[in-house]
């Protein structure tokens, strides 16, 4: 047999192998049936009462509700299977929704600390015929940072933002240590519990999240384009930690300025950092929002920044 013929056959086998993996990945969500997965809408309705819609995103809707057994307030997220969902392999070797896989890994008591922006806890999930249903903890009373700022005239005090940022960075470090990349940290995805005089942040919406490695370089964009890190906008490849640092800088910037951030405007110097902020605060924001990812500080270095100490 000629070498070219052998090469053609090998390429064909490789192609068929890759195609098989893609088909398995895309269909596995509808055929996953392990003992830990609940697949009945009746079971869901028997356990939970779904109520008013709280929000809507690119991949589904979130509703309020409660657990019937004890009236515990919950958030119910419904994700249609028509979307090209990210998937991860679970402990049973089955592909499951990446958001579920990530949130299962975040069920760690070490993450639930008042000095951290603890991710909301996944309480339950269902793999129904046409959608994935996530039942999550719902902090009450709480509101996202965008509404929180609006209720305070659009801008938060520097000391207040400092507390929130420190909590967020602690949690970002926890995610990095667990090889989790949120990908879309922004003010709409940070809740503030308002039950005390000291704000406590909670990180939500892991719909774009994924597992990562130290060597992982991403080329496909995921997140919010208008506030994206420069390197993620041009397809040149971006990494989890520098991107997360940028996103934290955007959250801090919006909280302190009351104006929506825009990466292009910031790059063109049309958005400037307030000069009446403390020098340490200005330095913190500038370091997070450096154009070149290699010039941004590491997450653990941010915790040692003079502004936060």
Image (cartoon, grey):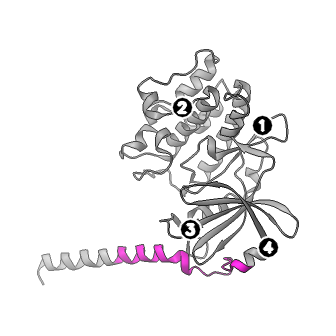
Disc 2/disc 4 C-alpha distance (Å): 44 Å
Q: Position of residue 298 (x, y in %)?
A: 55, 37
Alpha-carbon distance for marks 2 and 1?
22 Å
User: Could you tell me if the residues under marks 3 and 2 are in contact, i.e. CB atoms within 8 Å?
Assistant: no
Distance from disc 4 to disc 1, alpha carbons, whole Å, reads 32 Å
Q: CA distance from mark 1 to mark 3?
A: 34 Å
Q: Which residue is mark 3?
A: 80
Lower sequence index among marks 4 and 1? 4
Residue sitting at 32 percent across and 78 percent down? 16
- Pick the quarter of the image with the N terminus: bottom left
Snapshot quadrant of residue 292 = top left
Per the rendering, the mark at residue 288 is 2
Gap in angstroms between the C-alphas marked 3 and 2: 35 Å
Cβ atoms at labels 2 and 4 below 8 Å apart: no
- The image shows residue 68 at horizontal and vertical percentages of 84, 69
Marked residue nearer the N-terminal end (1 or 3): 3
Tell me if residue 40 comes above or below residue 105 in the rendering: below
Q: Label 1, on which residue? A: 199
Pick out the residue farthest to the right: 70
Tell whether 220 sits left or right of 4: right
Disc 2 or disc 1, which is closer to the eye?
A: 1
Mark with earlier residue (2, 1): 1
What secondary structure is marked by label 4?
helix
- Label 4 to label 3, Cα distance in Å? 21 Å
Q: Is residue 48 magenta?
A: no
| SS under mark 3 | strand
Residue range corresponding to the magenta coloring: 17-42
Which quarter of the picture shows residue 17? bottom left
Q: Is residue 294 visible?
A: no
Identify the residue position indicated by label 4 in the image: 47
Q: Is residue 1 left or right of residue 45?
A: left
């Amino acid at each position: 047999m000629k070498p070219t013929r052998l090469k053609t056959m090998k390429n064909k086998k490789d192609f068929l192998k890759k195609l098989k993996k893609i088909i398995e990945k895309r269909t596995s969500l509808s055929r996953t049936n392990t003992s830990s997965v609940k697949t009945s809408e009746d079971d869901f309705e028997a356990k939970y009462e779904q109520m008013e819609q709280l929000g809507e995103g690119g991949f589904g809707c979130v509703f309020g509700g409660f657990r019937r057994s004890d009236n515990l307030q919950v958030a119910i997220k419904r994700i249609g299977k028509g979307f090209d969902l990210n998937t991860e392999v679970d402990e049973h070797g089955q592909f499951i929704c990446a958001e579920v896989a990530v949130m299962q890994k975040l069920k760690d008591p070490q993450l639930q600390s008042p000095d951290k922006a603890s991710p909301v806890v996944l309480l339950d999930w269902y793999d129904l015929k046409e959608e994935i249903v996530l039942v999550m903890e719902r902090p009450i009373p709480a509101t996202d940072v965008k509404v929180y700022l609006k209720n305070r005239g659009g801008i938060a005090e520097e000391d207040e933002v400092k507390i929130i940022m420190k909590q967020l960075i602690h949690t970002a470090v926890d995610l990095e240590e667990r090889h989790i990349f949120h990908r879309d940290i922004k003010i709409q995805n940070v809740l503030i519990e308002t039950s005390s005089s000291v704000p406590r942040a909670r990180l939500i919406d892991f719909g774009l999240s994924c597992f990562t490695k130290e060597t992982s370089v991403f080329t496909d964009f995921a997140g919010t384009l208008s506030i994206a890190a420069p390197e993620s906008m041009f397809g040149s490849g971006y990494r989890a930690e520098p991107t997360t640092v940028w996103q934290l800088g955007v959250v801090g910037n919006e909280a302190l300025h009351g104006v929506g951030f825009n990466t292009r405007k910031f790059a063109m110097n049309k958005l400037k950092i307030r000069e009446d902020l403390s020098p340490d605060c200005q330095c913190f924001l500038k370091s997070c929002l450096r154009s070149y990812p290699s010039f941004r500080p590491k997450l653990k270095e941010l915790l040692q920044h003079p502004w936060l100490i």
